[in-house]
Amino acid sequence: MSVPPPCGGAAAALNFGIMNAARIIYRYLIAVFIADVLLQFFLAGAGVFSAGPGTAARESSALDPHRVNGMAVMLLALLVLAAGLLARDGWWRWALPLLVLTLLQPVLAIAGAAGGLPTAEW
């Protein structure tokens, strides 16, 4: 005769509740992430076109909102990965490359390999 472990059903129900909550949070975070990336494009354009004439856009303070929002995008990517891991649905396989790419993008921008507009003077 086997005796079930104490609180086995309650622990399983709690685990299922956490996974369901993580799935819902994952979906909302993905929506917020997409909206924030679209905002990031807008902020980049606004910063480039509001930098004064004869001033390199990357050296002006006009891109500061774009830089600050870039940190928010990285934080959102990290939260998406955490929610994907808690959901236990394999969604973390999408979130991990997303986080790696958001961490790699500033490195490429600093190196000058990911600029939208050339910096050559005409």
Image: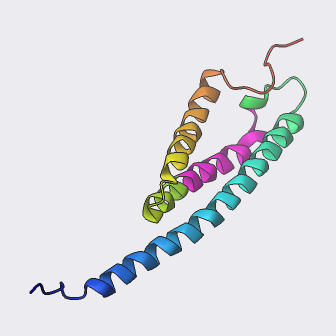
Q: Which residues are magenta?
A: 59-77
Q: Quadrant of the N terminus?
A: bottom left
Q: Position of residue 75 (x, y in %)?
A: 55, 54
Q: Quadrant of residue 29?
A: bottom right
As displayed, is residue 110 above or below residue 35? above
Give the total of numbered labels: 0
* 117 in magenta: no
As displayed, is residue 41 above or below residue 3? above
Q: Nearer the viewer, residue 55 or 27?
A: 27
User: Which residue appears farthest toward the left when viewing the image?
Assistant: 1
| Residue in view at x 47 percent, y 59 percent | 82
Q: Main secondary structure of the magenta part?
A: helix
Horizontally, is 36 left or right of 49 in the view?
A: left
As displayed, is residue 66 above or below residue 89? above
| Residue in view at x 73 percent, y 26 percent | 115
Horizontally, is 53 left or right of 33 in the view?
A: right
User: Which residue appears farthest toward the front when viewing the image?
Assistant: 1
